Image (tube, rainbow, N blue to C red):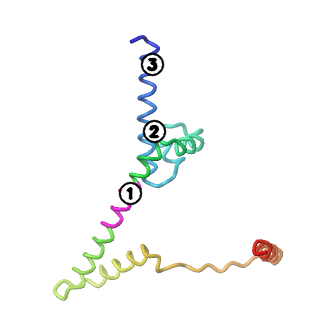
Amino acid sequence: MSRSSQRAFHASNKGKSKRERFAKEYAVDCNATQAAIRAGYSPKTARQQGARLLSKVNIALPLEEAAKAAELNAEEVIDGIRRTVQRCESPDNFQPFAVLKGYELLGKRLKLFTDKIELTGDDLLIERLTAGRKRLQE
């Protein structure tokens, strides 16, 4: 193997491992820029690298697989919370704070508790937003 082909071989393997690391890191928090940085790309170009990597087919497949695995893990976590709540509700092992925390976590997962935020602002802005909505409905 010539030196140039050896360099090309090592460069392609190095790139592949970075791409694989990117796919694994992206599955953690779905943040392409941070995943690129954690995978070893330069922080200066991480945003562009993340966008480029997300468009590649060979990256998309591992991401889909990781997403499916994450869904299974979420189901397992919810089942674990349910089992813990049931155990803590039993008369011989009643733990009211643990039960309450379990229900709180399940409620958050099911999005039962949403905060309402009251916004006050410029009357001109509100008028423009209202006019824009009317134009969209027409």
Residue 19 is marked as 2
| Horizontal side, residue 101 vs residue 84: left or right | right
Disc 1 residue type (three-letter): Lys
Residue 53 is marked as none
69 part of magenta stretch: yes
Disc 2 residue type (three-letter): Arg
Residue 7 is marked as 3
- Counting residues from the start of the chain, the first of labels 3 and 1 encountered is 3
- Counting residues from the start of the chain, the first of labels 3 and 2 encountered is 3
Direction front: furthest residue: 138
Residue at the spot x=33%, y=71% of the render? 78
- On screen, 42 above or below 85? above
Q: Main secondary structure of the magenta part?
A: helix
- Quick one: label 2, few (<14), some, or many (20+) residues within 10 Å? many
Q: Which residue is mark 1?
A: 68
Give coordinates of residue 59: x percent, y percent: 46, 43
Q: CA distance from mark 2 to mark 1?
A: 19 Å
Near-viewer residue (67 or 80): 67
Near-viewer residue (15 or 100): 15
Q: CA distance from mark 3 to mark 1?
A: 36 Å
> Magenta residues, as a range?
67-76
The N terminus, quarter of image: top left
Question: Nearer the viewer's eye, disc 3 or disc 1?
Answer: 1
Kind of element beneath mark 2: helix
